[in-house]
Image (spheres, grey):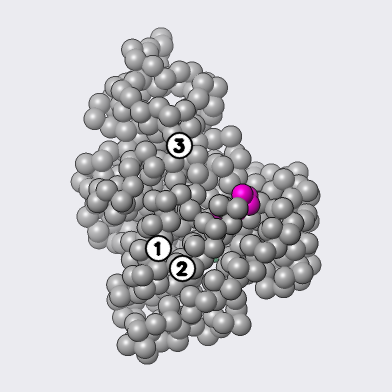
Amino acid sequence: MSIVIKNGRVIDPASNTDRLADVLLIEGKVAGVAPNLSSPNAEVFDATGLIVAPGFIDMHVHLREPGFEHAETIESGSRAAAAGGFTSVCCMPNTKPVNDSAMVTSYIVERARQAAAVNVFPIGAITKGSAGEELAAIGAMKAAGVVAISDDGQPVMNARVMRRAMEFARSFGLPVIQHCEDLTLSAGGDMHEGLQSVRLGLRGIPAASEDVMVARDLVLAQLTGARYHVAHISTRNAIGMVAYARGRGLPVTCEATPHHFVLSDADIRPYDSDFKMKPPLRSSCHKDAVVEGIASGAVSAIATDHAPHPGSEKMQEFERCPFGIIGLETAVGLALEELVRPGKITLNRMIELFTTGPDSVLRLGRGTLAPGAPADVTILSTDVSWTYDVNRSPSRSRNSPFDGRAFLGGPMATIVNGKFAWRRD
Ligand SMILES: [Zn+2]
């Protein structure tokens, strides 16, 4: 029932720790971080040359259960999370049925208890059926275990509904997570509107469709005092507006995905649906703004928006196939290679973006190695060589643009509530 992780470089941004030490885990809790720790019968993990961090949190995944188990399940998606270095994930409510009631929330919580490899925190819908009209049972879902509300996949288009949702969420102490897309501007689009969409002859989704929604919501967030979070932020203006609101003291946050800080619309392989997602891959000017926002603190969390779709759906023409890619197993490697290695952010900042950052939005009481905290630990290497082979993924879906990519650095082991959930072989 106990594990001692020996001789690692322990980085815990929550306590400003960055030093060589051992980490002792006993009965599902962090018992201590100090040199030369031991405990009778403890399993010893030699972390010499490795980084030992609080368990990483992915605040935006789609686990597809209930209703779309051919694409992913709580079991398969959570195993992909563990293999990606995550110890906690938050699952979006666009299942079938939509998680808009305490009954569906309880089902997810119970399935996770039986089958999940990592902690699973459900996010409830903002509106019934995520149809954007009537508010979902927010209080009952909160009592059943949701940690936020969102209609992700769909924006809440009606400003009056959004205002009411923010008022309710505030009274229940929940953040509101918006998929920012003004459908009247984006309708029919398949990729970012710009030179590349003209070149490929595909219909565009303008950056303005995101900007307009963020602007409106920030006005409503100020009006209501709600905690407001922008999912998968992707435009220069949206990041600027969030930074402005944060500077004025509003409880406003945003997350960025690895694909939006690694890829631009110039990287799209023509007709390859693994490059189709919402928001779309933007032009390099927007991509650079995402990286700058991550470095400056405007962006609080890296989240994958892991969105499994089975091959039968993704193997269609670009215009017809659904939006979204899987991302749980590549996120940490991409952040290490594309952000830390080139010096755009420090390793400590990267760990913040996967731990205290998302925890500050969701208040899970995780993302720290403080004594007594849940024994969730992510162990990393900055120089392990590995290649991502999507066909070996625990996920039930294969829609990744990073298949076959060689990485330098990535997760080595994941410990959830004091037990190994995954180890690199
Ligand atoms: Zn979304």
Label 3 sits on residue: 55
Toward the viewer: 102 or 267? 267
Q: CA distance from mark 1 to mark 3?
A: 27 Å
Q: Which badge, 1 or 3, comes first in the chain's sequence?
A: 3
Q: Which badge, 2 or 1, comes first in the chain's sequence?
A: 2
- Circle 3/circle 2 CB separation < 8 Å: no
Mark 1, Cα crowd under 10 Å, few <14 / some 14-19 / many 20+, is many
Mark 3, Cα crowd under 10 Å, few <14 / some 14-19 / many 20+, is many
The residue positioned 33% from the left and 61% from the top of the image is: 262
Residue 289: which disc? 1
Task: Locate ligand 1 by image quadrant.
Answer: bottom right
Residue type at mark 3? Gly
Image position, residue 216 (x, y; %): 65, 69
Label 2 sits on residue: 235
Q: Is residue 101 visible?
A: no
Could you say which quadrant of the image residue 162 lies in?
A: bottom right
Residue type at mark 1? Ala
Image position, residue 343 (x, y; %): 27, 48
Magenta part of the protein: which range? 249-253
The residue positioned 35% from the left and 28% from the top of the image is: 18
